[in-house]
Structure formats: structure tokens, C-alpha cells
Amino acid sequence: MTTTTGSCLCNACTYSYTGEPTLKAICHCTSCHKISGSSNTLNYTVPETAFSVTKGSPKSFSTTHESGMTLTVFFCPNCGSTLWKEATAENFKGLKVVQAGTLADASKLNQGVDVEFYTSTRAPWLMPQKDVAQRTEF
């Protein structure tokens, strides 16, 4: 089984997961705009049983997502990099939502995505991904 690793910018916090992501998604929701400081996030969902923190002690912050669920963001206390998220919505239970930009092997980003979420708040200069499901919510 494949092991994937990742870290924050300063390498104070590292993680790993085994297996392949259950979903690869671009999210354009307002919460992801603010979490990333950008127009979207690239998220890989992995089962929490396959995920582990291998170094450091990430901090967390919980907020109410615009969908009404509780969203908890885990980030490095030193550099502030968001590493993963957890959510209380039924379709996110038991999953870690890994921020794909934190993966150690950047070539994994070439695998494409399955879906784009919150397309109604996608930046108008971003085009929909070809042959990818487009959803206005989760």
C-alpha cells in the first residue's frame, strides 16, 4: 500500500496517510477562500484511520461553514500552513480533508480532480475543469 507524506512550510508539522484519496476536489466556498487566502483549495479526502501526524502538534480552529456544518482547520503553530480540515457534515464523517498543496511529492497534484464544489462562488476568471463534476454545494 502506498504511503503519502506531507508537511507545513517550515516542516515543524508532518503527516502521512496510506492508500489513495477517496475524493480529489477543488472547493470554491467562501470558507476555503479565507482558509487559503486564495480563490480555492485543492482537497484530498482520506479515511481518518489511514492518516497520522508524524511530527509536531498542529493547532486547530473551528468555525461554522456557510453550509451550517462545523469546520475544523488544523494548521502549523509556527508557520500557519493549513494541513487538513475536518467537518461534521455526514459526507465528511471519518475523513481528513488534506490540503493537497502540502504533499511532499508535488507530482501527485498531476492526478486531476473528481469534482469542483461551490462553483457559484468560483472566481469568474477560473474556468471549470474539463470532464469534472460541477456542484454548487457539497
Image (spheres, helix red, strand yellow):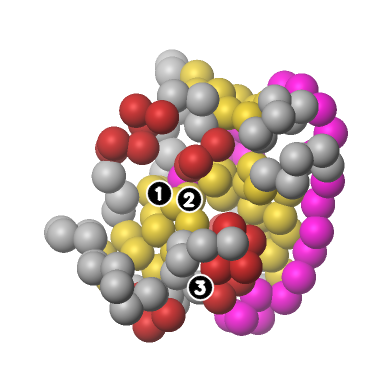
The numbered disc on residue 106 is none
Does residue 22 appear to the left or right of 130 in the view shown? right
- Is residue 109 rendered to the left or right of residue 3? left
Q: Secondary structure at mark 3?
A: loop
How far from the left and from the top, in percent, is residue 81?
A: 68, 44
Query: Nearer the N terminus, badge 1 or badge 3?
Result: 1
Q: For the point 35% across and 64% down, which residue is it?
A: 116
Seen in the image, is 61 located left or right of residue 38? right
Q: Which residue is mark 2?
A: 43
Residue type marked 1: Leu
- Dot label at residue 29: 3
Identify the image quadrant of the N terminus: top left
Tell whether position 54 is magenta. yes
Q: Is disc 2 placed on a helix, strand or loop?
A: strand
Q: Residues within 10 Å of mark 3 (few under 14, many from 20)?
A: many
Residue 93, x across and y down, in percent: 61, 56
The magenta segment: 44-68
On residue 23, the disc is 1
Q: Are marks 1 and 2 in contact (CB under 8 Å)?
A: yes
Q: Main secondary structure of the magenta part?
A: strand
Q: How far apart in space, not on screen, are marks 3 and 2 (Cα)?
A: 12 Å
- Going 46% across and 62% down the picture, which residue do you hit? 40
Q: Residues within 10 Å of mark 1 (few under 14, many from 20)?
A: few
**Residue in front for this viewpoint, 22 or 110:** 110
* Residue 78: in magenta span: no
